[in-house]
Image (spheres, grey):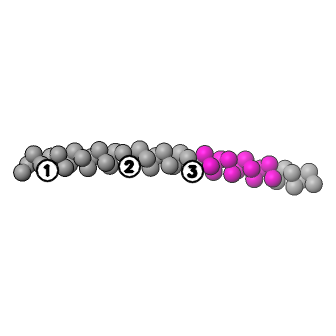
């Protein structure tokens, strides 16, 4: 039973670590999305000026 409890605790810790990784990836994606949106707006403004 002790071994099972240890395994469950280790599994819980691994899940928490994975959850943190997923949150970090979500934040990175959001940053990239905002950067792309900003760059796209810059390109559209340049295209309007070039016309």
Which residue: 29% across, 44% down? 38
**What's the mark number on residue 33?**
2
Q: Residue furthest right?
A: 1
Q: Residues within 10 Å of mark 1 (few under 14, many from 20)?
A: few
Return the x and y of residue 29 as percentages of the image width and height.
Answer: 44, 49
Q: Residues within 10 Å of mark 3 (few under 14, many from 20)?
A: few
Which residue: 41% across, 44% down? 31
Return the x and y of residue 49 as percentages of the image width and height.
Answer: 10, 45
| Distance between mark 1 and mark 3 Cα atoms | 37 Å
Q: Secondary structure at mark 2?
A: helix
Q: Secondary structure at mark 1?
A: helix
| Distance between mark 3 and mark 2 Cα atoms | 16 Å
Q: Which span of residues is magenta-colored?
A: 8-20
Kindly identify which residue carries mark 3.
22
Return the x and y of residue 32 as percentages of the image width and height.
Answer: 39, 47
| Prevailing secondary structure class for the magenta stretch in the rendered image | helix
Mark earlier in primary sequence (1, 3): 3
Mark earlier in primary sequence (1, 2): 2
């Amino acid at each position: 039973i002790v071994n099972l409890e240890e395994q469950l605790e280790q599994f819980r810790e691994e899940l928490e670590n994975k959850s943190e990784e997923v949150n970090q990836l979500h934040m990175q994606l959001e940053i990239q999305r905002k950067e792309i949106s900003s760059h796209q707006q810059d390109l559209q403004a340049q295209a309007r000026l070039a016309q």
